[in-house]
Image (tube, grey):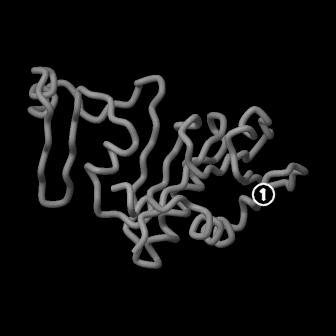
Amino acid sequence: MKKLIMAFSGPSNSGKTTLIEKIAKRSMKDNLKVLIIKHDPSDKAQFDYSGKDSFKFFQSGAEVMVLSPSRTTFFSHEAKDILQALKLMPDFNICLVEGLKTLALPRISVFCKEIDESYFNFSDAIASYEKISSELIWLDLNDTETIYQYILKNAKNLQGEL
């Protein structure tokens, strides 16, 4: 099976997370293993908290991996580029990336409210509720199946890169 990757961009509260969640669920119906990477440009995400052993270990400066019966969590002090991150998770069929708008990946920009044309320069398609006139491909935000099929056809195949 191919290793496909597609990115999603858009302003805050534009519907990116909702669309990615729908596409992930649709992909899993086809028994695809889905990996989602979310960009946190303002470094505000918290994955652990004070008082937990893993937090103490991470505060020591060490790289930390937590293994449990239902999940594996990795905490690193080093920024990873997209290929380094993907190599940590080699078992996927489709990777959906939220953000990282300057990364050269096939990209759908999502707009549930206002259209922000500043995203057009790095987009291959636009997903919105109202059809827009643009040279970019327009996808109806209400039509998850069509968006899913677009992704399968237009996502980048990373098979030879990983």
Q: Is residue 147 left or right of residue 2?
A: right
The vertical placement of 102 against 134, above or below, is above
Looking at the image, the residue that sits furthest to the right is 133
Q: Quadrant of the C terminus?
A: bottom left
Q: State the residue position of label 1.
A: 137
Q: Residue at x 85, y 54 (%)?
A: 130
Q: Quadrant of residue 2?
A: bottom left
Q: Residue at x 61, y 63 (%)?
A: 154
Q: Residue at x 12, y 50 (%)?
A: 67
Where in the figure is residue 126, as x and y percent of width and height? 74, 51
Q: Quadrant of residue 160?
A: bottom left
Q: Quadrant of the N terminus?
A: bottom left
Where in the figure is residue 11, as x and y percent of width and height? 66, 35
Q: Is residue 2 left or right of residue 119?
A: left
Looking at the image, the residue that sits furthest to the bottom is 30
Q: Is residue 85 left or right of residue 67?
A: right
Mark 1: which amino acid? Ile
Looking at the image, the residue that sits furthest to the front is 160
Q: How many marks?
A: 1
Neighbor class of circle 1 (other Cα within 10 Å; few <14, some 14-19, many 20+) is some
Q: Secondary structure at mark 1?
A: strand
Q: Is residue 124 left or right of residue 152?
A: right
Q: Residue at x 72, y 45 (%)?
A: 111
Where in the figure is residue 52, as x and y percent of width and height? 13, 32
Nearer-the-camera pick, 46 or 89: 89
Where in the figure is residue 24, as x and y percent of width and height? 48, 63
Q: Quadrant of residue 43?
A: top left
